[in-house]
């Protein structure tokens, strides 16, 4: 199996180095190929996503991505900015399914915005559709008959788009606790009615997964009231954007949260949800756990190595139990020392 490793800029190289140490320690027979992305690529070759990098991404079975967003590039035109690397990869590889797990490690439940006893039950995954919905529909500005300015954005989904995200979500539920909650607004929106009908059709192929439905306003409430009830949540682009950020704040530090963006065949790009944190780059202060947990997701969802993923996630939990704390978690351990703590358990 070939893994593309794109560290990026800012804290990217520091956090990626620790994820690589963890993967190497497991001796899984993976091959790695590195590529330049973001500010690092712009500085070297004048483009945030060079063709050589895209080639590696296309050949690889999975992509492990650090972070991009170098402040030195702030003056650049939009198409040359570091963030174009991630947007370009999503587009070129048709990564339409965004997986965002939110899990509270009991040792860190105090960092959650929720009460400790509510937060400690959180172990859920949000599957967000990435390529459709109101963000990509027809949009514009016009004048009404009375001469008022009117902005509009059309929300639409076709059944093929819903079907592929539904399959992605059911498959994710199969390798978790086998429960899927589809979130929509079917009492008001036609797109949601289609969404719900198609999800029910797809469910017939996954008799081992228990399907339920929830309106999005209720889902927002339940995420705060009783988040422990959720295993996997599947939803559209707009609702997923909001609910996934809400769920991450129920967990606590941004330095702990991993994510995946998958295509129809399960190939994916794995990255921490945080950016390149230029404010702490080069100081050894970055928490590498989000990237290490992203590597675990990669093993689970793209490389069929669930057991190795369990080992990494278990080692992270044990390291935290043993008191490993980087600066964002209120401690003083460096990026490397956090990596050491995980390796010591492995
Ligand atoms: P950010 O996530 O880089 O940083 C926000 C705050 O969290 C900062 O104070 C930072 O020091 C802290 N932080 C982030 N990751 C951390 C870690 N692993 N350990 C400890 N502390 C951590 O978001 P910000 O500052 O809004 O954006 C910085 C740059 O990153 C921007 O150019 C932005 O566009 C880019 N970005 C890139 C993303 C990606 O590569 N997928 C995602 C989000 C932002
Ligand atoms: Mg968001």
Image (cartoon, rainbow, N blue to C red):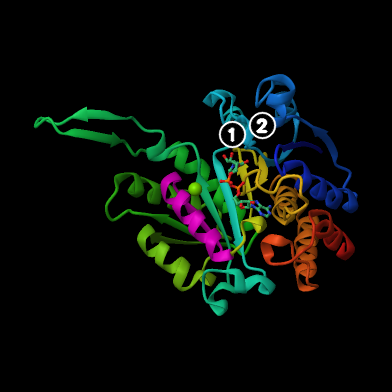
Q: Is residue 36 above or below residue 228?
A: above
| Residue holding disc 2 | 38
Say left or right for 146 vs 118.
Answer: left
Q: Is residue 157 visible from the viewing direction of this image?
A: no
User: Which quarter of the rendering shows the N terminus?
Assistant: top right
Q: Position of residue 247 (x, y in %)?
A: 52, 60
User: Which quarter of the rendering shows the C terminus?
Assistant: bottom right
Q: Which of the two discs, 1 and 2, labels the residue nearer the N terminus?
A: 2
Q: Position of residue 286 (x, y in %)?
A: 72, 53
Residue 268: give its label. Answer: none
Q: Is residue 38 above or below residue 343?
A: above
Q: CA distance from mark 1 to mark 2?
A: 6 Å
Say left or right for 291 vs 222.
Answer: right
Residue at the (48%, 59%) spot, across then down? 246
Q: Give the magenta range.
A: 231-251
Q: Residues within 10 Å of mark 2 (few under 14, many from 20)?
A: many
Residue at the (66%, 40%) spot, across then down? 268
| Residue holding disc 1 | 83
Q: Nearer the viewer, residue 97 or 319?
A: 319
Are circles 1 and 2 on residues that touch, CB within 8 Å?
yes
Q: Is residue 172 above or below residue 78?
A: below
In magenta stretch: residue 236: yes
């Amino acid at each position: 199996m070939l893994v593309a490793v794109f560290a990026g800029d800012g804290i990217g190289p520091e956090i990626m180095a620790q994820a690589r140490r963890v993967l190497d320690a497991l001796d899984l027979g993976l091959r790695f190929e590195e590529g330049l992305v973001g500010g690092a690529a712009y500085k070297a070759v004048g483009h945030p996503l060079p063709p050589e990098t895209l080639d590696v991404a296309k050949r690889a079975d999975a992509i492990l991505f650090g972070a991009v967003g170098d402040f030195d590039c702030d003056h650049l035109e939009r198409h040359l900015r570091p963030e174009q690397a991630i947007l370009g990869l999503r587009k070129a590889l048709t990564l339409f399914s965004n997986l965002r797990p939110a899990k509270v490690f009991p040792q860190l439940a105090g960092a959650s915005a929720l009460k400790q006893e509510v937060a400690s039950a959180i172990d859920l995954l949000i599957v967000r559709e990435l390529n459709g919905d109101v963000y990509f529909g027809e949009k514009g500005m016009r004048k009404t008959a009375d001469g008022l300015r009117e902005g509009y954005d059309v929300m639409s989904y076709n059944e093929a788009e819903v079907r592929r995200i539904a399959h992605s979500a059911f498959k994710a539920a199969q390798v978790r606790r086998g429960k899927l909650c589809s979130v929509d607004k079917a009492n008001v929106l036609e797109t949601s009615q289609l969404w719900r009908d198609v999800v029910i059709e797809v469910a017939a192929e996954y008799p081992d997964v228990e399907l339920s439905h929830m309106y999005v306003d209720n889902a927002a409430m339940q995420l705060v009231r009783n988040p422990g009830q959720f295993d996997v949540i599947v939803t559209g682009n707009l609702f997923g954007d909001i609910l996934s950020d809400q769920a991450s704040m129920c967990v606590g530090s941004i330095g702990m949260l991993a994510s995946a963006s998958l295509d129809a065949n399960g190939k994916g790009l794995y990255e921490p949800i945080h950016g390149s944190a230029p404010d702490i780059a080069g100081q050894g202060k970055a928490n590498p756990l989000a990237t290490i947990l992203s590597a675990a997701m990669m093993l689970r969802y793209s490389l069929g190595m669930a057991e190795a993923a369990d080992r990494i996630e278990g080692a992270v939990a044990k390291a935290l139990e043993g008191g490993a704390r980087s600066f964002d978690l209120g401690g003083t351990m460096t990026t490397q020392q956090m990596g050491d703590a995980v390796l010591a358990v492995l």
